[in-house]
Amino acid sequence: MNIQRIKQRYEEELLLNPNVVGVGIGTKIIKGISTPRQCIKIYVREKLPRNKLQKNELIPRKLNGIETDVEEVGRLKTQG
């Protein structure tokens, strides 16, 4: 299964998490440095330590073998 299909398969479920504001595809960032590894990007209002999250709020480290990368983006607003 390709990364686009995996993203589509899990996107709706991930967006049920109240902290998640978007889902995309990009490159994995580790300690502020972009790597060549493609991943599923999970955009959240606030990035919190795993021990501060409820079990149902945790983002899996992988989806169908594809790495995820959680990125804090704050609150998103539509522009009008």
Image (cartoon, rainbow, N blue to C red):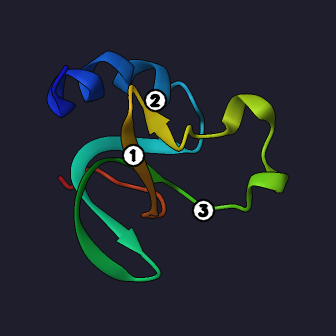
Relative to 52, 75 lies left or right: left
Q: CA distance from mark 2 to mark 1?
A: 17 Å
First in sequence: mark 3 vs mark 2: 2
First in sequence: mark 3 vs mark 1: 3
Q: Which image quadrant for residue 60?
A: top right
Residue that numbered label 2 is attached to: 15
Residue under the image location 22 percent in, 46 percent down: 25
In this rendered view, identify the residue nearer to me: 24 or 60. Answer: 60
Relative to 58, 54 lies left or right: right
Relative to 59, 43 lies left or right: left
Residue under the image location 29 percent in, 49 percent down: 39
Q: Residues within 10 Å of mark 1 (few under 14, many from 20)?
A: some
What is the three-letter code of the residue carrying label 2?
Leu
Q: Is residue 28 above or below residue 24?
A: below
Q: Which image quadrant for residue 2?
A: top left
Relative to 57, 44 lies left or right: left
Q: Is residue 17 above or below residue 35?
A: above
Q: Is residue 26 above or below residue 64?
A: below
The residue lying furthest to the bottom in this view is 32
Q: Position of residue 80 (x, y in %)?
A: 17, 52
Q: Quadrant of the N terminus?
A: top left
Q: Position of residue 53 (x, y in %)?
A: 78, 46
Residue that numbered label 1 is attached to: 67
In this rendered view, identify the residue nearer to me: 78 or 19. Answer: 19
Residue that numbered label 3 is attached to: 47
Residue under the image location 42 percent in, 64 percent down: 73
Q: CA distance from mark 3 to mark 1?
A: 17 Å
Q: Residues within 10 Å of mark 2 (few under 14, many from 20)?
A: some
Secondary structure found at label 3: loop
Q: Position of residue 65 (x, y in %)?
A: 38, 33
Secondary structure found at label 2: helix
The residue lying furthest to the front in this view is 65
